[in-house]
Image (cartoon, grey):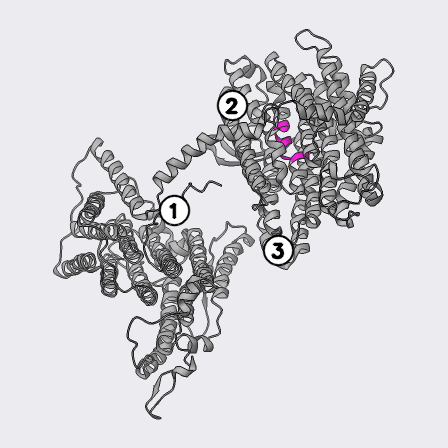
């Protein structure tokens, strides 16, 4: 269970920031951080077992028939990645708390971040490839939200769209590849697939699967030629860049290559595709990085280059190279996250990250300078920092690998890549921090507060520690992860000195020397770079996308022209056509069920329903009359329910009917009272034809259904048999609602509560300054008002009825478990009793005397229902299992108490709150439109012979 | 009897669809209400028709009507109330904001270039 929980925690945590932001930014960050910390802690608890070489597993059957199971497993590789994702995630949460500006919505940011974090953790813990694919696509989606977080910046939106298109497209290719792989192995479980190396590599489908999966990995990890999205994703806030491009998003591709390494690697195809792509990416991106003036662009291309390096190592296909790749993943995450955060600090304090406008920050920002120096030197591969260790090992591997029988090609190119890496790393330090202090910074730079530099400083400490004591601090993790990648125990030996005869030493020296020289020649190289024409990736991408966007726009605009009537017509006809096709191609026989006789009274009911319906169509332009007719139809429907043995439905229908008609009357007060003739006769005939088709079709279907016996044994017998013994109630419908299908009902009252809140929110929006509010303020009633709008007779009658109605409601509620009634109906009855007071004495008078917060009612209702459900857990039973018992309290008879009753109280409160909130919202609109605020219960007091609620009271 | 119920469902559906094809919000809401009746009754009839056999335990009850469709329709009725209330409010808001109660967007309201940036 714990692994599934680790993956679920960030998703659950994503719900919190939106709520906690109201308690302040610190509380919001603290809560978000605690969730991540908790997940990290749970991961840590599993770590000892994994380091012992065990594989921790959690298996949850989800849809076994599709091979889709929520299976998770944690091995060394998963531990390494989950640790990076959660650990660096924690630092990012801290950093973002101080980085984001006041105007940035922090709750949203943390929500997106946690969604992304959850998706990433899901990828690295999934044991089922279908599940992995779901998480994979989730990272694409949530990174889209993160990259486009600054919605007001066009670069942000375009960068987000490009990232989504490229990584999402790659993801689609990968789905195909994974499905092929699953088919070859005969299982979608990774642990099974990883055992089937021979079968997979011998299959004819190996190459297509390999290419498709690599497309997914290469797009995600920004490998050539898909690298172009990553620099454009730099439009995101720096915490996002630091997170996505050091430890998470782009590492997902590497993770998958490492995960699939045991089954896919070792073939010439793997070597030539993966190693070559990695090599090209590494050298090309390192070169471009040298010529970028924007600090984040420099780091972006450097990231692409390092990803290329790791890809190349994985491509070599040897256990040693894969081990180095794992080690470099750790090192790159530490120094690159620190550098991104530092670039963000420079941007935050100096208000620019353009190297041309920076320089001399060394004395102004000594702390940042120290962090950047450590991390950059590590990136350059200077001893004794951790970047040096893995680069040295990389060069050693490169020197011993031949490409197309050419023994020195990879070694030379790797050295050139390292050379550029040295050059841009030193350029970062030299051009931003060294040199004379300038007088023209956009803002006066100084070191930020502790909160902002704490995270990168911690990472810089790690850089040094891993650099100095690699065997102590990192080797155990590298061993565990590399063993998982290669499938054989690995015991790595990391040293600083490989001896004079190691080629890596001389390659390293050449890279450092050459790099320094390149930095010295930088102005001249830069001029050359600017002079050479280069393909602009964004322009090509936009050009490629343009026709698709146009086509999509044409289709969407053609189908959705904003005419609701057209959608309904098309939809109705389409459904009718499909149904007719099914009917026409199937076989049909007349139903054999005995028909019921037609007694005269029900026939009269049918007649009034049909006549009222016809009258609605004919007189629908008179809206008030229409409402009266709708009331007749509703009444006949409820009588019909009563006749056909459904007393609960009849009660519900009739009370809902009352509430609906009152609501529509209130709304009609502000709407035109008549519908004008607009459509031509032809159009009306056409609409009529569609309506008749729909009506005839449904009628035929209903008739066919009713004249047949069910094709399958209905499950109702179970409910009928178990209602009393299992649920403790004799009213089977009510027991189904509160017990058998309690979960449905629970969802239902939540939906109802949400509907009421939506109405409230809509009202709030209407009452804000704007055209709607202006119209309401200038409202002139278009109907004559009654002279006596709050007649005393009505007031007295409703007052007398109120206690009786409340009692009826209470009675209906209590008997609900055994006789027709229950929470739904009782809630509606009590609501109507209260609404009658509103009608009699006006909204203002009543609201002043009835201090009930309808929001609180809804919330209480849902919470009580939830608490009842959770209560079952304490008895070790599933959510919402009801318990009941029989009690006798003298002098009463024996009676039954069931937890279902408590649940029904929740239903009752929610229904009451929702109905009242909806009606009260309409009344508030009425008040804004100049409804008189009545201070007295009725307008005219005959004993005093004067008008009490005068117009002055407005 | 079955024919009467089926024809009533058909009538309500036809009237509902016709009104939903009108161009003002109020008829559309009324049409949706009628359609809701039709759908609820249709779902209810999936338990087949029966008289005098309510799904309530009783001594010597001749049988019970199918309780499951009843329970489902009961919640459907309440939910459709919530839905009607929301669209009534939306219609009211749209009328107050725009000054007219037409349901179809005219050319000024349609995003001219398909929402492209």
The residue identified by callout 3 is A21
Instruction: State whether residue A388 is above or below residue A868.
Output: above
Quadrant position of residue A538: top right
Q: Which residues are magenta?
A: A245-256
User: Residue A851, how many percent across, how many down?
Assistant: 49, 74
Marks counted in the figure total: 3
Query: Which one is nearer the viewer's eye here, A649 or B116?
Result: B116
Provide the secondary structure element on which disc 2 rests. helix
Residue A255 lies in the magenta-colored region:
yes
Q: Residues within 10 Å of mark 2 (few under 14, many from 20)?
A: many
Spatial CA distance of label 3 from label 1 is 36 Å
Outermost residue toward the bottom in this view: A944
Q: Secondary structure at mark 1?
A: loop
Instruction: Specify the quadrant that holds the N terminus of chain A.
Output: top right
Residue A896 placement: quadrant: bottom left
Specify the subunit that label 3 lies on: A
Q: Dot 1, crowdedness within 10 Å: few (<14), some or many (≥20)? A: some
Residue under pointer 1? B110
Answer whether labels 3 and 1 touch (C-beta < 8 Å).
no
The residue labelled by disc 2 is A177
Quarter of the picture containing the C terminus of chain A is bottom left
Q: Earlier in the sequence, mark 2 or mark 3?
A: 3
Farthest residue, direction right = A500
């Amino acid at each position: 269970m714990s692994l599934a929980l680790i993956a679920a925690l960030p998703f659950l945590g994503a719900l919190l920031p939106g709520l906690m932001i109201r308690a302040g930014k610190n509380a919001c960050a603290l809560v978000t951080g605690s969730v991540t910390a908790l997940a990290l802690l749970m991961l840590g608890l599993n770590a000892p077992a994994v380091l012992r070489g065990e594989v921790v597993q959690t298996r949850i059957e989800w849809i076994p028939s599709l091979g889709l199971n929520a299976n998770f497993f944690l091995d060394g590789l998963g531990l390494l990645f989950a640790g990076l994702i959660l650990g660096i995630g924690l630092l990012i949460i801290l950093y973002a708390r101080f980085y984001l500006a006041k105007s940035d919505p922090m709750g949203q940011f943390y929500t997106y971040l946690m969604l992304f974090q959850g998706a990433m953790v899901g990828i690295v813990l999934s044991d089922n490839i279908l599940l992995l694919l779901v998480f994979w696509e989730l990272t694409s989606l949530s990174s889209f939200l993160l990259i486009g977080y600054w919605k007001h910046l066009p670069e942000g939106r375009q960068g987000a769209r490009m990232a989504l298109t490229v990584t999402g497209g790659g993801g689609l290719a990968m789905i195909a590849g994974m499905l092929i792989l699953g088919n070859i192995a005969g299982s979608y479980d990774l642990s099974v697939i990883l055992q089937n190396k021979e079968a997979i590599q011998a299959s004819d489908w190996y190459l297509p699967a390999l290419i498709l999966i690599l497309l997914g990995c290469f797009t995600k990890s920004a490998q050539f030629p898909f690298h172009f999205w990553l620099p454009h994703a730099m439009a995101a806030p720096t915490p996002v860049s630091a997170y996505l491009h050091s430890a998470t998003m782009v590492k997902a591709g590497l993770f998958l290559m490492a995960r699939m390494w045991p089954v896919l690697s070792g073939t010439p195809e793997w070597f030539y595709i993966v190693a070559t792509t990695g090599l090209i990416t590494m050298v090309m991106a390192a070169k471009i990085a040298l010529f970028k003036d924007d600090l984040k662009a420099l780091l972006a291309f450097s990231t692409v280059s390092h990803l290329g390096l790791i890809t190349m190592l994985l491509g070599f296909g040897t256990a040693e190279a894969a081990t180095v790749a794992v080690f470099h993943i750790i090192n790159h995450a530490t120094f690159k996250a620190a550098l991104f955060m530092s670039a963000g600090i420079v941007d935050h304090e100096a208000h620019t990250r353009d190297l041309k406008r920076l320089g001399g920050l060394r004395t102004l920002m000594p702390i940042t300078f120290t962090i950047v120096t450590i991390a950059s030197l590590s990136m350059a591969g200077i001893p004794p920092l951790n970047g040096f260790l893995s680069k040295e090992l990389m060069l050693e591997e490169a020197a011993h690998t031949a490409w197309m029988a050419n023994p020195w090609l990879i070694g030379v190119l790797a050295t050139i890549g390292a050379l550029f890496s040295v050059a841009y790393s030193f350029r970062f330090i030299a051009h931003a921090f060294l040199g004379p202090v300038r007088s023209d910074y956009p803002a006066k730079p100084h070191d930020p507060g502790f909160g902002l530099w704490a995270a990168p400083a911690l990472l810089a400490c790690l850089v040094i520690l891993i650099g100095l004591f690699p065997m102590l601090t990192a080797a155990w993790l590298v061993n565990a992860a590399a063993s998982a990648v290669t499938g054989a125990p690995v015991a790595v030996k990391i040293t600083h000195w490989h001896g004079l005869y190691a080629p890596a030493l001389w390659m390293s020296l050449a890279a450092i020397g050459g790099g320094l020289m390149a930095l010295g020649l930088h102005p001249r190289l830069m001029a050359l770079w600017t002079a050479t024409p280069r393909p602009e990736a964004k322009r090509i991408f936009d050009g490629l996308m343009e026709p698709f966007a146009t086509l999509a726009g044409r289709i969407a605009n053609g189908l959705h022209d904003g005419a609701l009537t057209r959608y309904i017509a098309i939809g109705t006809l389409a459904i009718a056509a499909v149904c007719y096709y099914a009917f026409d191609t199937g076989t049909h026989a007349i139903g054999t069920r005995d028909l019921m006789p037609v007694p005269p009274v029900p026939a009269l009911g049918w007649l009034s329903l049909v006549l009222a319906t016809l009258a609605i169509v004919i007189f629908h332009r008179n809206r008030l009359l229409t409402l009266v007719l709708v009331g007749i139809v509703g009444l006949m429907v409820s009588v019909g329910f009563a006749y056909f043995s459904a007393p609960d439905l009849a009660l519900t229908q009739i009370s809902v009917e009352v509430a609906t008609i009152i609501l529509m009357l209130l709304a009609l007060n502000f709407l035109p009272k008549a519908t004008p003739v607009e459509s031509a006769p032809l159009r009306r005939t056409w609409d009529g034809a569609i309506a008749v088709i729909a009506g005839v079709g449904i009628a035929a279907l209903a008739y066919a259904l009713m004249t047949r016996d069910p094709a399958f044994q209905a499950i109702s017998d179970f409910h009928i048999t178990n209602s009393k013994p299992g649920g403790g109630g004799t009213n089977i419908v009510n027991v189904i609602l509160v017990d058998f299908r309690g979960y449905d009902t629970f969802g239902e009252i939540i939906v109802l509560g949400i509907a009421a809140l939506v109405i409230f929110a809509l009202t709030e929006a209407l009452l804000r300054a704007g055209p709607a509010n202006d119209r309401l303020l200038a409202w002139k009633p278009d109907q004559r008002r009654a002279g006596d709008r709050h007649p005393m007779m009505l007031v007295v009658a409703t007052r007398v009825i109120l206690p009786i109605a409340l009692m009826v409601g209470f009675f209906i509620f209590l008997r609900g478990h055994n006789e027709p009634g229950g929470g739904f109906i009782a809630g509606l009855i009590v609501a109507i009793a209260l609404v009658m007071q509103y009608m009699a004495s006006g909204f203002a008078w009543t609201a002043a005397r009835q201090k009930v917060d309808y929001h609180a009612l809804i919330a209480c209702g849902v919470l009580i229902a939830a608490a009842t459900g959770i209560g079952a857990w304490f008895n070790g039973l599933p959510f919402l299992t009801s318990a009941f018992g029989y009690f006798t309290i003298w002098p009463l008879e024996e009676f039954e108490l069931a937890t279902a009753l408590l649940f029904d109280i929740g239903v009752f409160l929610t229904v009451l709150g929702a109905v009242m909130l909806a009606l009260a919202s309409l009344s508030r609109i009425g008040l804004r439109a100049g409804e008189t605020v009545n201070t007295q219960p009725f307008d005219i007091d005959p004993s005093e012979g004067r008008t009490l609620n005068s117009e002055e009271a407005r | 009897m079955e024919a009467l119920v089926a024809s009533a469902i058909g009538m309500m559906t036809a009237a509902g669809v016709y009104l939903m094809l009108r161009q003002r919000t109020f008829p559309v809401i009324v049409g949706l209400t009628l359609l809701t009746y039709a759908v609820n009754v249709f779902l209810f009839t999936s338990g087949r028709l029966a008289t005098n056999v309510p799904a309530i335990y009783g001594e010597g009850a001749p049988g019970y009507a199918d309780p499951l469709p009843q329970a489902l329709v009961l919640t459907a009725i309440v939910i459709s109330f919530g839905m009607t209330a929301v669209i009534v409010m939306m219609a009211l808001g749209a009328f107050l904001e725009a000054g007219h109660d037409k349901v179809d967007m005219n050319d000024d309201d349609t995003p001219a270039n398909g929402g492209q940036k």
